[in-house]
Image (cartoon, rainbow, N blue to C red):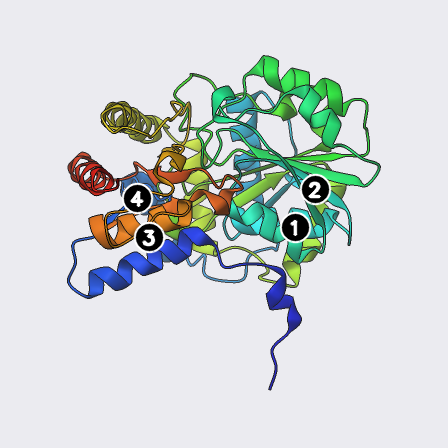
Amino acid sequence: MQLSSFLNRFNEPETLKMAKMGRELRSQGFDVIDMSLGEPDFDTPAHIKDAAIQAIHDNWTHYPPVAGFLDLREAVCTKLKRDNQLVYKPENIVVSTGAKQSLANAILAIVDEDDEVIIPTPYWVTYSELVKIAKGKVVEIKTALSRDFKMTPAMLEAAITPHTKLFMFSSPCNPSGTVYSKQELQELADVFKKHPDIFILSDEIYEYINYKGGHYSIAQIPEMKERVIIVNGLSKGFAMTGWRLGYIAANATVAKACEKVQGQFTSGANSITQKAAVTALTADLRPSMEMKEEFARRRSRVLELLKDIPGLPCSAPDGAFYVFPDVSYYYGKSDGETKIENASGLSLYLLSKAHVTSVMGDAFGEPACVRFSFANSMKNIEEGWKRIKTALAALT
């Protein structure tokens, strides 16, 4: 009996793999501090949970439309107008079981075999694997810590070929926390204007966790809107990871194509989640802003703790809830038992010696770095970085 060769096209997400290893170690009785998963450590706000309970009582328990309930798609349009000054109609919106499915729908709807997809590093681990599933070719634009992991218009222009079909990125970025300014996005758009057949997929899932101020979407540049697929969702900004709700906003042709793809995979997203999402998107955003303020306090503390550890250069993240330091200073060093060869080796060393989970940068296209989440309590952050400092000090 032989399984499909399809399984050989892509890898298991390193984020999930490291979290799994941490759980296994915890099950053996070890006190493991999780800095690997990108999950807010807050509970879903009460008014959103109340809306879900009411939806159950109101018997919203039947199959929903594939693209999502009309009132939710209207709520997404309301949010995009309120927060992003973007006008969409419900026909431009497709609701999915998490932003990951939204990404998959869009890539499968756009990318043909051997089409090139440009992705600046570092990028979320699933981007490249979804392109491989679609039989496309990943073209990486290598950025640098010295430039806060931002690509330039010249770098973008150099990567474009006649085979380029899609450009995809996130701002705020997972894992680096990089946020592109309005001016920087305008400069990238000037390049795209010369190449009208390229789609732009803008992952904006960390929109509300932005420490620079207001979020700006590349879709707000008038000439870009029809070519941009915005991907967003409720997991990060509303602490609704387990509810599984993502969505796209795109031109009607792309939206219809994504609906067709989704119709053969999952049909519509969970009906109760959809009703709760209407409340999340249209009600008071104060709970989301309070979460962001707490993340900002943790960010400041983590950056202080990083400065106290030699050999971990790191740019200050302008969004999301991760730091992404360069760890190559420790390559070739040993504690007498373990020699660190690469970022993967360092992550595994910290797991076994410090009992702290992290994610190696190779998974994000940046093999010199490791991602650490600060979506954890201040107490765990303090203890986790204390352990990391001790473990790294043992390497000579």
Q: Residues within 10 Å of mark 3 (few under 14, many from 20)?
A: many
The residue beneath circle 1 is: 131
Q: Residues within 10 Å of mark 4 (few under 14, many from 20)?
A: many
Q: Are marks 1 and 3 in contact (CB under 8 Å)?
A: no
Q: Are marks 1 and 2 in contact (CB under 8 Å)?
A: yes
Q: Nearer the viewer, mark 1 or mark 3?
A: 3
Q: Secondary structure at mark 1?
A: helix
Would you say residue 32 is visible in this rendering? Answer: yes
Task: Establish if 382 lies above or below 338.
Answer: above
Q: Quadrant of the C terminus?
A: top left
Measuring from the top left, give residue 389's x and y in whole percent.
21, 36
Q: Are marks 3 and 2 in contact (CB under 8 Å)?
A: no
Q: Secondary structure at mark 2?
A: strand
Q: Are marks 4 and 3 in contact (CB under 8 Å)?
A: no
Residue for point 72% across, 39% down: 166
Q: Secondary structure at mark 3?
A: helix
The residue beneath circle 2 is: 117
Q: Quadrant of residue 385?
A: top left
Q: Nearer the viewer, mark 4 or mark 3?
A: 3
